[in-house]
Amino acid sequence: MENIKNAKSKTINLITLGCSKNTVDSERVLGHLSLAGFKVVHDGDAYSADTVVINTCGFTADAKDESVEMILKMAYAKREGIIKRLYVMGCLSERYKDDLREELPEVDDFFGVDDMREVIRCVTGSTCDMGVARRLTTPPHYAYLKISEGCNWGCGYCAIPLIRGRHVSVPIDDVVAEARQLAAKGVKELIVIAQDTTYYGMDLYGERRLGDLLHRLCAIDGIEWIRLHYAYPTHFPDDVIEAMAGEPKICKYIDIPFQHISDNMLASMRRGIDKAGTLALIDKLRRSVPGIAIRTTLIVGYPGETEADFKELEEFVASQRFERLGVFTYSEEEGTYSAKNLKDDVSSRVKERRRERIMSLQEEISLENNRRLLGTVRRVVIDRREGDFYVGRTQYDSPEVDQEVLIRHDGELTVGGFYDTRIDTVDMFDLYASVV
């Protein structure tokens, strides 16, 4: 029993909530805790360690609720003597540190988004050079590669600039060095992330350099897929489109949140692009990169959204037939332009009804798109084994958020391996295939 207690006292449980950018932050902290001689657990329960660190999200109302619920759960565990130390870091802590400290005395300390060194110092009692030490929490064949922090756009609804600050790029050589280290560890798929990947380099080089970065990443041995997330549509760089068209390692996939299509809504959201510009960009992407899968997100129920605005959004979804699509209902975030200047005048009932209408439409589109794939051969990476199936993805699908390929196979398939598969059956959000 004493050995179990000693092991638990040298174990740290880090719980990650929120987006993939938070995942990278947690992986850096986990890496340095490991270097300091601690055993680390990711997303464990209250019994797995004496020390718990919660990396929180504060982007939307639902995300904040989830973060608060987890803090309360672990605060109860501390009161009950199940854990001894509790720390909170990340976006929620950055925004509401003083309020949280007053309401949650069980938490030993709170840290903001730029306080990772302080988290490590507080937990381990020693300082560190953050460097690129990481302990991956994803399957070992893919990793998120964060190329910048913050955002300069100031969209009306978005609290990210309030939490993460203005756009700050990681130097190209540093990004490439980290990517090489990941490749040396067996990573085959890099998922390039930032709040706005297409703005990359403006602060350091006076020009957008994402295209240059992508070419350098493509030259790294061992990397087979490079995937681009969170691309802002305004002033989309032509050289990025050229790189996607010309570099075979870059997946024919892009995550680009359009949010709306009505000029009235786009202007109110302060998106910096209008309907004509949006449609022209979609057309250019599809002409230049044949077969590209476009993933987008939309917001319904934004202040002032009329039935005419929503109808225009419905028609946009119906006409563009996006391969991947998600819908959020507007939630007012204190401190944002919208919260300070606009009235949240669309009822919750109407917001939810509009969300359901878009998602119902997208389900039909997704099924229609998938039916076109029947009988075709698609290259798939295997992410895991689950029951009777191997579960994989095509280049047109990102982990966690997109559809999967389920493969029955009598022999052994390698997790992280790539296989040619024939699509035999489909439903709205998944494909069923056999190895060719």
Image: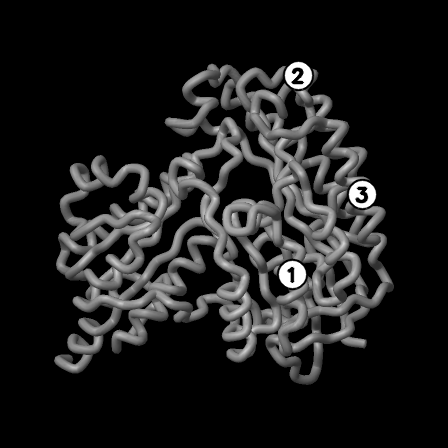
Q: First in sequence, mark 3 or 2: give its number.
A: 3
Instruction: Classify mark 3: residues with Cα within 10 Å, few (<14), some (14-19) or many (20+).
Output: some
Amino acid type, mark 2: Glu
Asked if labels 2 and 1 touch by Cβ distance under 8 angstroms, the answer is: no
In terms of secondary structure, where does tag 1 sit? helix
Q: CA distance from mark 3 to mark 2?
A: 29 Å
Between label 1 and label 2, give the one nearer the viewer: 1
Instruction: Classify mark 1: residues with Cα within 10 Å, few (<14), some (14-19) or many (20+).
Output: many
Q: CA distance from mark 3 to mark 1?
A: 19 Å
In the visual, does 342 lie left or right of 414?
left
In terms of secondary structure, where does tag 2 sit? helix
Asked if labels 1 and 3 touch by Cβ distance under 8 angstroms, the answer is: no
Q: Locate the N terminus and report the quarter of the image it occupies.
A: bottom left
Q: First in sequence, mark 1 or 2: give its number.
A: 1
**Residue 428, position in %: x, y?**
72, 49
Q: First in sequence, mark 3 or 1: give its number.
A: 1
What label does residue 214 carry, if any? 1
Q: Which residue is mark 3?
A: 284
The answer to which of 118 and 62 lies nearer the viewer is: 118
In terms of secondary structure, where does tag 3 sit? helix
At a point 38% along the width and 60% down the height, the residue shown is: 26
**Residue 351, position in %: x, y?**
56, 25
Asked if labels 2 and 3 touch by Cβ distance under 8 angstroms, the answer is: no
Q: Which residue is mark 2?
A: 307
Image height of 274 relative to 189, above or below: above
Amino acid type, mark 1: Leu
Image height of 100 relative to 192, above or below: above
**Residue 61, position in %: x, y?**
41, 35
